[in-house]
Image (spheres, rainbow, N blue to C red):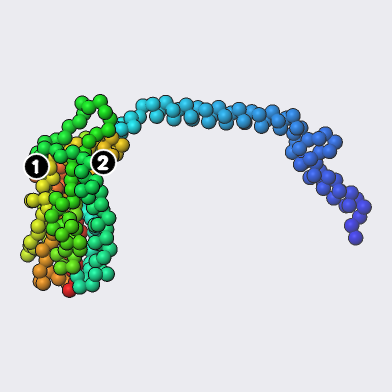
């Protein structure tokens, strides 16, 4: 049984522990009076409001240096990458089963909606072989040159809604990434090769896979709202000997000063994909 002295000591310890949170004799909470806590809270309120004001002022000054239409720094990606549609680097389908290639066909059809005549009639009929320069115009909104899906002929999805997939001769669409102010020199075109000893026949649309200069330069998403990238369609004319085999295909931008052989970036000016058609 605990002694009277032990009980008294326990009470003192409990009382001391409670007083550290609230002392009824002095009215202190955690060692501070109400006025002391009020002064501390007021200090931190003013301090953090000052920091928030400094941050807002800094952001406001920085935003004053930015242009809504042209990025301040544009030197990170001086050359465009090359991408394909359908958006898949490994394609495999059975040409006799519509369900196997329906996803590819739907992807192409959706992608080409912005190239329909109803949309492209709003754009300009530009002279071929010349850059469409608009630097001297006061209006910040720039005009865009037409690129109708009909330019892709057999790969437009107009005459053949299956884009050649049902006959085992699929169409692949290629485009360069947008880079503001890019003006490629020379006469750029897309060239594709199969990485094997025996080549396969291909058709290019527009003719020879050429990308006209009139689609350059690009002025940015906000200034060039109606702009669409020029496309090149490649129709792979596969034969029976090519079916049931995985074919690696590499496409490059040629005929220009744009880089296509950077080993550090496999998509700079080129793209490689694999396709397999099953009977």
Relative depth, front residue between 7 and 120? 120
Report the residue marked by disc 2: 226
Foreground mark, 2 or 1, reads 2
**How many labels, in total?**
2
- Residue 90 placement (x, y as % from top left): 24, 62
Query: Which residue shows up at 79% across the image and 45% down it?
Result: 17
Report the residue marked by disc 1: 187
Where on the picture, by quarter, is residue 247?
Answer: bottom left
Above or below, 145 relative to 55: below
Is there a contact, CB below 8 Å, between mark 2 and mark 1? no
- Residue 219 placement (x, y as % from top left): 24, 35
Q: Please identify the quadrant where the C terminus is shown.
A: bottom left
The secondary structure type at the circle numbered 2 is: loop
- Residue 215 placement (x, y as % from top left): 17, 40
The secondary structure type at the circle numbered 1 is: loop
165 lies left or right of 202: right
Q: CA distance from mark 2 to mark 1?
A: 24 Å
Neighbor class of circle 1 (other Cα within 10 Å; few <14, some 14-19, many 20+) is some
Point out the tag, 2 or 1, that comes first from the N-terminus: 1
Query: Which residue shows up at 27% across the image and 33% down it?
Result: 141
Q: Residue furthest right?
A: 4
The answer to whether residue 228 shows anywhere in this view is yes
Relative depth, front residue between 18 and 222? 222
Neighbor class of circle 2 (other Cα within 10 Å; few <14, some 14-19, many 20+) is some
């Amino acid at each position: 049984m605990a002694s009277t002295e032990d009980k008294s000591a326990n009470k003192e310890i409990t009382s001391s522990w409670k007083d550290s949170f609230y002392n009824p004799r002095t009215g202190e909470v955690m060692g501070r009076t109400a006025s002391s806590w009020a002064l501390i809270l007021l200090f931190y309120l003013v301090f953090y409001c000052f920091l928030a004001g400094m941050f807002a002022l800094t952001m406001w000054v920085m935003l004053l240096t930015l242009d809504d239409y042209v990025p301040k720094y544009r030197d990170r990606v001086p050359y465009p990458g090359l991408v394909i549609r359908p958006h898949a680097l490994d394609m495999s389908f059975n040409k006799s089963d519509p369900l196997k290639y329906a996803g590819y066909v739907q992807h192409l059809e959706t992608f080409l909606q912005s190239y329909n005549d109803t949309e492209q009639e709003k754009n300009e009929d530009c002279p071929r072989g010349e850059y469409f320069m608009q630097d001297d115009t006061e209006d910040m909104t720039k005009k865009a040159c037409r690129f109708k899906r009909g330019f892709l002929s057999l790969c437009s999805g107009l005459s053949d809604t299956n884009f050649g997939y049902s006959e085992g001769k699929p169409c692949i669409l290629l485009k360069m990434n947008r880079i503001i102010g890019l003006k490629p020199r020379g006469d750029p075109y897309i060239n594709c090769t199969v990485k094997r000893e025996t080549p396969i026949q291909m058709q290019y649309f527009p003719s020879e896979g050429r990308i006209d200069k009139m689609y350059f330069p690009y002025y940015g998403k906000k200034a060039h709202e109606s702009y669409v990238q020029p496309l090149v369609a490649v129709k792979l004319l596969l034969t029976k000997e090519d079916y049931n085999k995985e074919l690696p295909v590499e496409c490059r931008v040629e005929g220009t000063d744009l880089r296509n052989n950077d080993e550090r970036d496999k998509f700079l000016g080129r793209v490689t994909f694999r396709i397999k058609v099953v009977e």
